[in-house]
Amino acid sequence: MDKEHRPFAAEGYWAVILGGSSGFGLATAKRLARAGMNILIGHKDKEGLVDTVIKPHFDEIRARGVKLVTHNANLFDEDERGMVFESISENAGPGKVHLFMHSIAAGACKLITEDKTPDFKAQALKGLSEALKAQGANVSAEALGKAANHAFHELRCDALYTLADSKIPYREELLSEEDLQRTVWMMGYDYMLWGRELCKEGLLSPSARLVAMTSEGNEVAWKGYAAVSAAKCALEASCRAMAVELAPYGARSYVVQAGITDTPAGNAIPNFDLMKAQARLRNPFHRLTTPEDVAEAIYSLCLPSFNWANGTVIRVDGGEAISGL
């Protein structure tokens, strides 16, 4: 492949991706490997999953002719964090980390209080049953509910998302103070702490890009998402601070806001199956965002020509966030 398609092949640059075994992180690792960038991934997965599901993806990256270093480590643990950082220093070396991406999903998706929302779905099914009866069709609200669930989940009738039951219910446990602290620290401030250390140790390239992930839940209140939403607000504040204070070192800081994407992390959010349907309806292109959409955007951020955006949220959602139904 020529330099146009592998622009980083001659630079010896590295991408350090925390949370790189699935979703946005893995897609970005694959895209940058295609562009000739070496990859270091930190992740936390069960060994059985690594051997059966993740390893083929890592083999695909290595087949691109780049170096790949992976660490299945608990990034909450100081010793293991230190081990990963030491590996970055040893493998990439001074001035060679061109991309640092923080894509760790470690949030607690729990309600903050008991849900007292009126049962609008039951009211709608009851009303529909009564309307059908007036038309001579005697169908109970229970039967209509079962039909709505079948049509939604099995036949992919997205427009029925307001009448269907989610297969990802709210957890019984309410959000604890420990849940909140852990989520805000890991998903809000950890990006800044890693970026600062990489800069302090001289590991960032002369024009490094630092990227973290947010979602529309940074502004929209999704039930069960309070802790993660708070973390995303902290993350965006961290991004702005890094943009100002790391600029003298040549680094740019971004937060990428992806649209609703079918990832393992996303599917841990309560009601996410209903959210995906709603997103497909309101997105101008009537499809979900893919990890590859996001990977292409982050690849573009890494190019020399993309050098004047800094400290901002970049939406990669096909216009989803600005579109109504």
Image (cartoon, grey):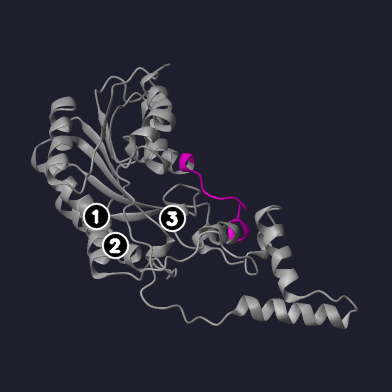
Does 156 appear above or below 250? below
Tell me which residue sits at (14%, 28%) in the image. 93
**In the rendering, at what x and y percent does residue 4 appear?**
41, 23
Mark 2 and mark 1 in contact? Answer it, CB < 8 Å: yes
Q: Please tell me which residue lies in front, 317 or 310.
A: 317
Q: Is residue 81 left or right of residue 301?
A: left
The magenta stretch spans which residues?
280-292
Residue at numbered disc 3: 268
Q: Which mark is residue 122?
A: none
Q: Which mark is residue 231?
A: 2
Q: Please tell me which residue lies in front, 228 or 130.
A: 130
Query: Looking at the image, is mark 3 or mark 2 earlier in the sequence?
Result: 2
| Gap between marks 3 and 1 measured at Cα | 17 Å
The amino acid type of the residue labelled 2 equals Ala
Q: Quadrant of residue 56?
A: top left
Q: Of all residues shown, which one is farthest toward the right?
A: 136
Q: Is residue 107 left or right of residue 73?
A: right
For the residue labelled by badge 3, is the local secondary structure a helix, a strand or a loop?
helix
